[in-house]
Every structure is written in C-alpha cells, then in structure tokens.
Image (cartoon, rainbow, N blue to C red):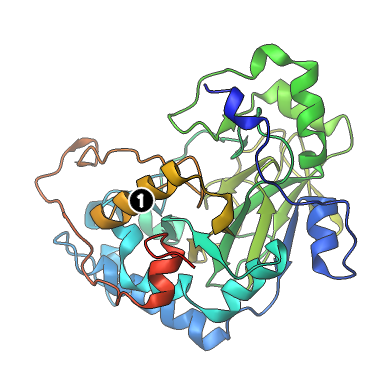
Amino acid sequence: MPHAEYTNEPKIDTSVTHGDWRDDLYRDGYYVVKGVLPEAKAQSYVDRMFQWLETFPYGFKKDDPSTWNQQHLPDHIKGGMYYGYHCQHEKMLWDARTEPALIDAFAKIWDTKELLVSFDGLNFTLPAGAAGIPPSEPWPHVDQNPIRKGMQCVQGILNLAPNGPDDGGLLVMKGSHALNEQFFKAFPEKVGRGTWGSIDWFGFEKDEVKWFEDRGCEVIKVCAEPGDLIVWDSRTIRKSLPHTFSLCLRGYVRIHGKSAHSGADWNKLPDSQNLRAVMYICYTPASFATSADREKKIDYYNKKLGTTHWPHANIFHQEDKHLRLGKPDSYSRDSPVEKAEESDLLLKLAGVKAY
C-alpha cells in the first residue's frame, strides 16, 4: 500500500463555517440534501432501471412479480448492487450524473464547477419477499485510505425511491470521520491491513467499531425521499443495509433523533418490503487528479469500465468474473445497452476533455 504519495494531497478546509448544510456535513460526516431532483424525475429513473433489467435474457418482467427473484435477475451483490455488464456507462447513469442540480450540490461542497465524476454503479434492490435475498455479513467500512488525511472525497447517493426507517438503506456512524485519524494513530498496525483490492477501502471488525461507539459515535439509519441526495465524508464509517438487515448495531440505532432498541447485532429482518433504488454518484475537483490518474480515467472511459467511488484517484477496476448464481454465465456484454450522448459536459466530467 503506497505511503509517500499521500503526504501533500489536496483536501477541503472543514474548519470554515458557511452557515448552511455544509456545516452539518463537516460536523456529522453526512447530510441529506433535500429535493435535488423533482419526484417525477426520480420516478423516471426508477422506470428506466426496470427497463434495464428487462434487457437481459433471464426473463425478468416488471409487470410480473413472479419474475422478481434471483433466477430472473442479472448478476449482482448484496441483494441489488450492480457493477457488471458495463452498467456504469449506461445512458440512464450518465443522464443522472449530468443533472445540473446534482452537480450544483457538489460544486457547493468543493467551491468549483470544474468537477470529475466517478464511474460508479447502482443499487436496485427488489422487495425481500419477492427476490429471496440471501443474508450476508455486515461490512462496516470507510472508503478512504488511512494514510490520506482530511476530507479528500465526498461520496453521494442519489435516492430515487422512498427510503424510511424500516427500509434497506445507508447506515453511518455519526461523527466517526472526526476520529478516523485518532483511531489509526492509536492502532498503527491496522493501517496496512489488506482490502478487497481498492487501496481506498478499510473494513472494521466488531471490536474496532465499538472503539468509535465508546467515544460517542451513534449509528444512524439515513432516511431520504425520492430526489434527495445523501452525501458523506469518505472517512465516515458506513455500510449499506439490504432488506434482510436490521437497523441496529449493538442494540440501538438513532433515526431522526430517536433511539430505537432492537437486537444485539446488524442482522435482523426489518418490517419493510419496499423497493430500494439509488445511484452511487461522487464528484471531486478536476484539479485534484494527477496527470497519470487522468490518463487512466480516460482509458477506463473509452473502455467503458467502472471505477471506485473516487472520481480523481484510486482509479481501480475489479474484473467481471462472468458468474451468475455461483456458476459461469454464458451471457456477457462488452458495452452498455444504451450509450450516452457524448456532450461537452459529459466528456469534461469523465476527464476526457479539459476544463
């Protein structure tokens, strides 16, 4: 894991007070920006996600709930996270990435409109009862290398369907970003621990999560309406909550300022059977990218490959193993089904054209 290159990296000054929602982001490590897209526009993206699933040869039909199961869906992970089939470059995702209001929200964070965007995927999780989502282990983590200092990346979820306290969604540990550096100073031996491949990922064990709890960090189930944008500091401990997981860690979770007591771990069936539809979209200043990373990003764009949550660095792609239901899948794609129009804005966000 490289170290020297992380000593003088660009980051935002979170000590500045703005008098708006950025102060909440700096303090808590996350924030929900309300109504970035109109509800009707959010619903149009949900409809396009359904249409995308119907393009596969597995028999999925939106109007036939009997096909809302693993046997009729393309390969995915964690119940509904899609990263294969070059989906990161589908037109629907690029249309979302170029939404002016979405760009404006991140431009407010970084104080510039000259941004790069991540080539990230989507989450389209069908109701648990219909899809038969198998349970999996929790994965509390941060998406910033412990060697990096300060707020260098802000991640984003464009929320497209109602997501309340009983639905699958995002869990964060409020305030954990502010203790990130202290934790790794206290336990330097943990810094170089291996990851799934991306250098900007660190997974926490149960006792390590407790260290943050003992210092006042609360687990928050983040709720959002269609068209809301959830943003969080990449140093904030978080995990996604599929429909088969509870809303609690070590017995409680805080939702909208109220404590809700439940079981003693992450795993407990919730009450909801609602659809989850989100796109993972992150922007950072184009000026943050090195020339080497920009060249790599251009190559990934031309090959229509996905990346991590980081738009300007950690340009890393995990190869599609072409597996489905645990077996080799004879069906594959070498490009998105519906290609995006290469507008001037799109090419600048992709890093292909300079600002």
Tell me if residue 293 comes above or below residue 214 in the rendering. Answer: below
Asked whether residue 62 appears in the rendered view, the answer is no
Number of callouts? 1
What percent of the width, then of the height, locates residue 217? 83, 40
> Mark 1 falls on what kind of element?
loop
What percent of the width, then of the height, locates residue 58? 17, 59
Which residue sits furthest left?
330
Which residue is more in the foreground, 188 or 241?
A: 188
Q: Give the amino acid at mark 1.
A: Gly
What percent of the width, then of the height, locates residue 348? 44, 67
Tell me if residue 254 comes above or below residue 143 in the rendering. Answer: below
Which residue sits furthest top?
189
Tell me if residue 299 comes above or below residue 209 in the rendering. Answer: below
Which residue is more in the foreground, 122 or 132?
A: 122
Q: Is residue 305 left or right of residue 168?
A: left
Q: Residue at x 42, y 42 (%)?
A: 292
Q: Residue at x 52, y 72 (%)?
A: 160
What percent of the width, then of the height, locates residue 134? 41, 42
- Answer few, some or many: residues within 10 Å of disc 1's Cα (few below 14, many 20 plus, some between 14 and 19): many
State which quadrant residue 123 falls in: bottom left
Q: Residue at x 38, y 45 (%)?
A: 77
Report the residue marked by disc 1. 306
Q: Residue at x 46, y 73 (%)?
A: 96
